[in-house]
Amino acid sequence: MSTAVATRKRAKPAPRSGAAAGASKRRRKVDSAGDRGKAKNGGKMNEEISSDSESESVAPRKTEEEEEEEELEETAQEKKLRLAKLYLEQLRQQEEEKAEARAFEEDQVAGRLKEDVLEQRGRLQKSVAKEIQAPAPTDIRVLRGHQLSITCLVITPDDLAIFSAAKDCTIIKWSVESGRKLRVIPRAKKGTQGQPPGHSSHILCMAISSDGKYLASGDRSKLILIWEAQSCQHLYTFTGHRDAVSGLAFRRGTHQLYSTSHDRSVKVWNVAENSYVETLFGHQDAVAALDALSRECCVTAGGRDGTVRVWKIPEESQLVFYGHQGSIDCIHLINEEHMVSGADDGSVALWGLSKKRPLALQREAHGLHGEPGLEQPFWVSSVAALLNTDLVATGSHNACVRLWQCGEGFRQLDPLCDIPLVGFINSLKFSSAGDFLVAGVGQEHRLGRWWRIKEARNSVCIIPLRRAPAPPVAGS
């Protein structure tokens, strides 16, 4: 019995071992569940790792999407960088615009300085002739007041008034705008005391100072009269020439006056001080015309001696030029180094101070007249040039004023157009601005009475010079 009880007592802990077994079972279940979870997770990892093709195909698509999102959703740092780049670009553009503006201003200044240098050297040649349009005959204004042929005229530096003189010994001051007479200097009678001063013989030449203060006029009586240009009051009378005074010119920027005469001399005067300076000789015949610019020198047309001379006043020397076959009756400076002249052989010549012969010579510039077999060229009675440009005008008695264009370097003379005017064109002058040309027209030549054109009218003609409009800029 005791043995059996002891066996039962020893057998009582069996249920604990059952609980332990249950716990161990639960632990095994948990472990098996964890193993199954691990197995499942491991399966997923194995699936992801093993499917290389799928991972390669999905990854690039995610990268493109991310890049698009990065472009759309920039960070604050990227925005700052973008704005900084934009600001720098704006600054660069502004600096480029400023540099272009500075370069443009510098080009303008350089161009002006270049023009000034070329003008001082006498080589400036602005191209304006090709822009000139021939005016209609109805646009020409005719001012009548002289009884005899106009012999000479000048325009004031401000282009507001014109002085004209004629064989009737009178001087008239005209208003350019209205065409009315502003002043009249009447003819003076010879041997009459106490009369207002004036000319008593044909007036052959006039000149006005570059400041518009003084007017000088010369006549066949060997006299040079100096007037106050504004009021036409007589100031001085210069005597000294031994024959008719045929040419007058003021040196630009000064009151120094050059005169020439049929006595073959050139004289220098100081008008402001009412004094004579000196006399130069050299021509072999009566001098027909004279002109001057800023340099201390003048040019003369020698008439029948067939020469053009440049007089260097300080050195008291002269340069002699040959080229025309006939009598050289008119001359005009284009710039400090070039001039144009006309002769009674019908030729017009362009000269340069560095050449003794003409740079260009246009024969029969105004054509021929006369019976067949006995044709003679029309005399060139007047020439004018627009200062420092390529535009030249010539006059004769073939019923027109002819405009010419000087070629590059003044080595060519090409006709531009004809402006109809009946009569002897005894004087031509361009305005300072180049917007009109004034012609002195007469029934007779200014130096004689070889012909008479009855249908002509003794008058001053104002010819407008309109320029062609500039072509439109491409893209405007």
Image: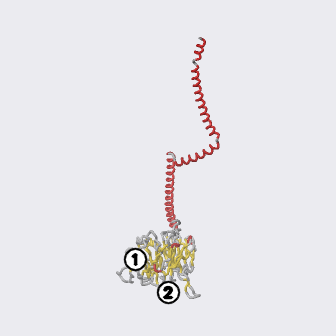
The single residue placed furthest to the left in the displayed view is 194
Expressed as whole percent of the image width and height from the top left, the position of residue 471 reads 52, 69
Q: Position of residue 350 (x, y in %)?
A: 55, 74
> Hey, what amino acid is under mark 1?
Ser
Q: Which residue is mark 2?
A: 451
Point out the image quarter for the N terminus. top right
Q: Which residue is mark 1?
A: 178
Q: Residue 141 has which mark?
A: none
**Picture coordinates of residue 196, whole percent (x, y):** 36, 80
Most foreground residue, 209 or 77: 77
In the image, 475 versus 407, the foreground residue is 475
Separation of marks 1 and 2 at Cα, in angstroms: 33 Å
Question: Of the residues shown, which amino acid type is indicated by label 2?
Answer: Trp
Q: Secondary structure at mark 1?
A: loop
Task: Name the quadrant containing residue 167.
Answer: bottom left
Quick one: 331 or 316, which is closer to the camera? 331
